[in-house]
Amino acid sequence: MIKPYNQTENKKKQVTKMFDNIAKTYDSLNNLLSLKIHLLWRKSAIKKIKKKPKTILDIGTGTGDFAIVAAKYTNAKIIGIDLSKKMIDVGKKKVLEKKLNTRITFKIADAEKLPFKKNSFDVITSGFVVRNFENMQKGLSEIYRVLNQKGIILILEPSNPSKFPLKQIYNFYFSLILPIIGQIISKDKKAYQYLAKSVEKFPDKNQFILELNKIGFKKCQHIPLSFGIASLYIAIK
């Protein structure tokens, strides 16, 4: 299991600590390192929703980017959950500035033990979060439980492009350049070293779709984004 800081403390505590540490610089670094393309990926995901959802749960909402994009393109009530209070605090300020506080609410909660009844949400989103789960099967099972029948999940995760020369350029940037920039700006080099390692160890598209199928999800799809730099997974309950 890949952990941010050490192999002794449990992953959940370490991930929470990591995001608390980088909360103040997270948005600026995310925009810099992805050239704001991550916002286009979130928009692409939300645009896949065919029906008009009334309720959306954003798992690992962080500073609320996915929830904000969802509010822009739907009329749903949105709840964003995260383990990191400091990330949520940043998200609350953004939502207030955008006057979306009547549409988007935040809650500190564990994705592997969701504080909601089964069949509570029409759509569940997750942006670059699943690889941070301590127990992936447990987290995916909880998502399945609280999703409505015929509800849709939209999962974004970084991925490794497979074609030359993008693969080689991406791997060089992701494993060497990104941690250096992350350390300079966030002062937490290990957080961005963990990012690269966690992407490398995440199941490939076929393995992850198999995991979704095991949980019970149907019509599972994988859509590569930006030449395979990111992956969008879509499935139905």
Image (cartoon, rainbow, N blue to C red):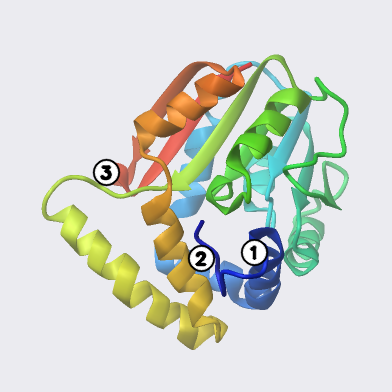
Spatial CA distance of label 3 from label 2 is 19 Å
> Is 97 positioned to the left or the right of 176 in the image?
right
* Residue 212: x %, y % from top left: 53, 26
Q: Nearer the viewer, mark 1 or mark 2?
A: 1
Who's the residue at 60% across and 76% down the image? 25
Q: Is residue 53 above or below residue 77?
A: above
Mark 3 / mark 2, whichever is N-terminal: 2
What is the number of the mark on residue 30?
A: 2
Cβ–Cβ below 8 Å for labels 3 and 1?
no
Cβ–Cβ below 8 Å for labels 3 and 2?
no
Mark 1 / mark 2, whichever is N-terminal: 1
> Is 98 positioned to the left or the right of 116 in the image?
left
Spatial CA distance of label 1 from label 2 is 17 Å
Q: In which quadrant of the rendered image does the C terminus lie?
A: top right
User: How many residues crowd mark 1 within 10 Å: few (<14), some (14–19), many (20+)?
Assistant: many
Residue 78 occupies quadrant: top right
Tag 3: residue type? Answer: Phe
* Residue 217: x %, y % from top left: 57, 18
Q: Is residue 95 above or below residue 41?
A: below
Q: Is residue 49 above or below residue 94?
A: above
Q: Nearer the viewer, residue 120 or 131?
A: 131
* Residue 204: x %, y % from top left: 36, 39
User: How many residues crowd mark 3 within 10 Å: few (<14), some (14–19), many (20+)?
Assistant: some
Q: Which residue is situated farthest in the left direction here? A: 164
The residue under label 3 is 227
The residue under label 1 is 15
